[in-house]
Amino acid sequence: MSDALSLEFEFISAMAPVQAEGMVAGCPFYFRARTQKWEFTLAQNPSDDPVELGPEDVSRGAAWYRTGEVAGGPFAASYLPLDEAASIIRDCAREYISDLPP
């Protein structure tokens, strides 16, 4: 999937957990939805692996990170429909692009 956001991604797992990986503006990201929450981690350095980064890496400038909850029960995120997951990914990409300096 790709669009005008300089966003490309593919789902690498469709459920339990829902996972995707791709690139936003030349930076790799990893998306994971499991139990009740989703996480989007983007590596600020294109040579870093976003799977190995998390919220603790934001303060040192290595990662850009967002998370949220999925309504619908204790395992709703594990079975998040792919169109909803893609929408979250696009929203995160837009937010990341808008956070970039001009």
Image: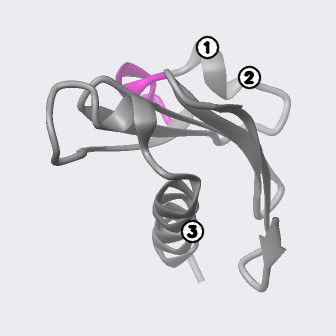
Residue at label 1? 52
Say which of 37 and 82 sits in front: 82
Q: Residues within 10 Å of mark 2 (few under 14, many from 20)?
A: some
Give the mark nearer the N terminus: 2 vs 3: 2
Identify the residue at image location x=67%, y=39%.
20
Q: Identity of the amino acid at label 3? A: Arg
In the visual, does 65 lie left or right of 25?
left
Magenta stretch: dominant SS? loop
Q: Is residue 102 above or below residue 38?
A: below
> At which x and y percent is residue 89?
55, 58
Question: The C terminus appears in which quarter of the rendering?
Answer: bottom right
Can you tell which quarter of the image residue 54 is in?
A: top left
Residue 2 painted magenta: no
Q: Quadrant of residue 100?
A: bottom right
Residue under the point 74% across and 22% down: 49
The image's mark for residue 49 is 2
- Where disc 1 sits, the SS reads helix
**Image location of residue 63, percent across then percent down:** 53, 36
Q: Which residue is mark 3?
A: 90
- Residue at 45% x, 70% y: name it: 95
Q: Residue at x 58, y 72 (%)?
A: 97
Is residue 4 in view? yes
Q: Earlier in the sequence, mark 1 or mark 3?
A: 1
Q: Which residues are magenta?
A: 54-61
Classed neighbour count for the residue bearing mark 1: other residues with Cα under 10 Å, few (<14), some (14–19), many (≥20):
few
Mark 2–mark 1 distance (CA, rounded to whole Å): 6 Å
Which amino acid type is shown beneath numbered disc 1? Answer: Glu
State yes or no: discs 2 and 1 in contact (Cβ < 8 Å): yes
